[in-house]
Image (tube, rainbow, N blue to C red):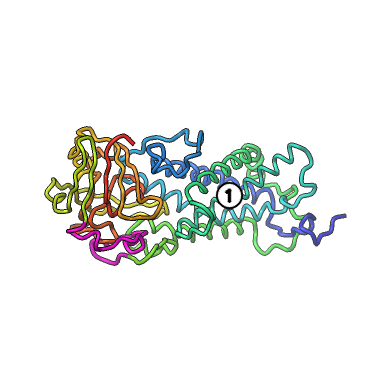
Amino acid sequence: MSDPRLPTSPGFWRSPLRGPWFTSVLGLVLLVGITVLFVTGLVSYAAYNPGLSPVNDKTPDKGILGFYLFAWPTNPYWLYRLTQGVHVTLGITLIPVLLAKLWSVVPRLFTLPPARSLTHALERISLLLLVGGGLFEFTTGVLNVQLDYVFPGSFYPLHFYGAWVFFAAFVAHAVLKLPTAVRNVRRAREEGDLVAPRPDSATVSRRGALWLVGGGSLLLFLTTVGRSFDGPLRRTALLTPHGGAEPGGGPGGFQINKTAAYAGIDAAETGEEAWRLTVTGRTGTVRLSRADLLRMPLHSSALPIACVEGWSTSDQWWRGVRLRDLAARVGHDDPPDVLVESLQRHGAFRRAALRANQVADPRSLLALYVNGEDLTPDHGYPARIIVPAAPGVLNTKWVARMTFGDL
């Protein structure tokens, strides 16, 4: 007879809450939620245009995993703000559901023997990938949202490859368990290996426990969703990353991740006398001062900033030179791709590439002003890129060089 003091014994697990109905309800919620997370994650990856240029590609060995990549559109202009906001907010909201689901099935992780057959062994391996992959993806995602890069390596390949491993195990698990889960929810029968043989006295019902899990998810939602809005709701976003000093009020008083000081931008190199924009294209290279740019036709666009961490701003009023006009300045009447380089000397996206459709969009600017005033140093003075629907890191700040042509 097994020792009830050991977790390998069914008698060790005495919570009256565990059972197939409780586990199945949580599983069905995760089935929908994780599917949305995976799809929006793939969409976010496509938004970086990794198939455009090695500069943008943080997973060069992805092989067939990049089969779905497509040219990222500029319409609707709030597309990335929506998809990445959903991805991050939903991911954080699902954390209590994921933890409750893992708690509900933890006795199965200690079942002996570990493998009763080859089929059972394969199922246990898939569960290891499922549990480990889920914890890895949620943990790295939360750390990235908070700008805490304590994990080894770059977030982008770790999260990308981890997502494929996790979702493959998730799909296999869903195919095997979905029919059973639906039956358990419909019949509400409490029998099987998850039910404690000698349960302790109940202090809350299973439905009450679900309300508790739902309340935890609601709390995380309310302290996260405000990151996608300005105004009073933003004050509820206690989990919003700050990444340095807030820019304060005024025309430049909207969120940033990296300050000019953090990026190592010296005020001397951005001054009127020192700074020049180098633009290269079919007819050669020109060097333009800020005064030269101000003599070109200026245009305005109302566009948000949206970042991979899930935060975004409302529309800001940008004014500057259209990217397609800069392309025409160096001989490209039909706008091509462009490589943009920053004065920033370190960081994964100090160089970024944009597709021809992004360059051609009349709202895509080399911005010189925001909300009626000069750009602040933290928002990219003397000039920055702003493109509809592009991730924030592709809206390069402190622009020094632009190279138009096939990348």
Q: Is residue 252 found inside the magenta-colored segment of the image?
A: yes
Amino acid type, callout 1: Gly
Q: Nearer the viewer, residue 20 or 125?
A: 125
Task: For mark 1, give the secondary structure.
Answer: helix
Q: Position of residue 105 (x, y in %)?
A: 68, 51
Q: Is residue 159 magenta?
A: no
Instruction: Please say whether residue 373 is visible from this viewpoint.
Output: no
Quadrant where the C terminus sits is top left
Residue farthest to the left, as pictured: 295
Res 331 seen here: yes
Residue 144 located left or right of residue 165 = left
Dominant secondary structure, magenta: loop
* Camera-side residue of 345 and 360: 345
Question: Where in the figure is residue 8, as x and y percent of width and height?
Answer: 78, 55
Q: Which residues are magenta?
A: 247-274
Residue 371 in picture, x, y percent from top left: 21, 57
Task: Say whether residue 265 is left or right of residue 295.
Answer: right
Image coordinates for residue 325, horizontal then vertical, percent: 19, 41
272 vs 62, left or right, is left
Among the 4 quarters of the image, the one containing residue 252: bottom left
Label 1: how many Cα within 10 Å (few below 14, some 14–19, many 20+): many
Q: Residue at x 58, y 42 (%)?
A: 165
Viewer-proximal residue, 214 or 168? Answer: 168
| Residue indicated by mark 1 | 134
Q: Quadrant of the N terminus?
A: bottom right
How many numbered marks does the figure carry? 1
Q: Residue at x 76, y 57 (%)?
A: 7
Which residue lies at the image location 41% right of the left edge and 51% below the top edge? 348
Which residue occupies the foreground of this view, 113 or 365? 365
